[in-house]
Amino acid sequence: MKIAFGCDHAGFPLKAEVLAALEALGHEVVDLGAANATDSVDYPDFAHAVAARVSSGEAALGVLVCGSGVGMSIAANRHAGIRAVVCSESYSATMARLHNDANVLCFGARIVGPGVARLLLESFVSTRFEGGRHARRVAKIEP
């Protein structure tokens, strides 16, 4: 599966770990930045880049990392068809995919460490949308 990835300077410390974990799970990762942690950058730029790839179908899922995950999710959710969620434990990541058909995972590098990040990624990318009664509910999200 193709997964679009983006982070800002605060999320950069987890970048290598996230990319390695996704590749180890057998996924192709499109790295949309940030290029380094020394330059302060604007998180919406990366959220929009990832959301555009997922919204267009160029990537199946997206992963965004900033300090808390919140800003990234707000920006990503501005795109049609994007259901970005902030998770800091694997149950929410699983349920977001299973019941909400979430397609962008956001988390904070200042909140989760490498071990929890791997668990979040594994839960999110391995869970498929259950459909059924949940499809009706997800359909009501878009205006």
Image: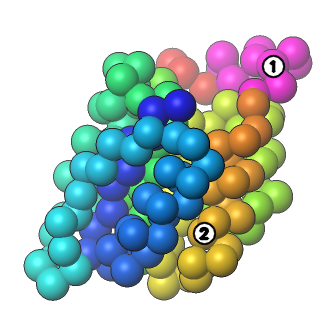
Q: CA distance from mark 1 to mark 2?
A: 26 Å
Give the residue at mark 1: 131
Q: Quadrant of residue 86?
A: bottom right
Q: Give the side of residue 47 with respect to residue 94, left or right.
A: left
Q: Is residue 97 above or below residue 143?
A: below
Asked whether 76 falls inside the magenta stretch, the response is: no
For the point 81% across and 19% down, the residue is 131
Depth check: 77 or 32 in front? Answer: 32
- Give the number of the disc on residue 117: 2
> Which span is picked out in magenta?
129-140
- What amino acid is at disc 2? Ala
The kind of residue on which mark 1 rests is Gly
Q: 21 or 107, which is in the foreground?
A: 21
Residue 50 — which label? Answer: none
Q: Nearer the viewer, residue 34 or 86?
A: 34
Near mark 1 (Cα within 10 A), the count class, few <14, some 14-19 or many ≥20, is some
How many residues crowd around disc 2 within 10 Å: few (fewer than 14), some, or many (20 or more)?
Answer: many
Determine the residue positioned at 65% across, 43% down.
125
* Magenta span contains residue 136: yes
The image shows residue 88, relative to residue 57, as above or below, that is below
Q: Residue 120 at x, y = what percent?
A: 67, 61
Extreme residue in the left direction: 39
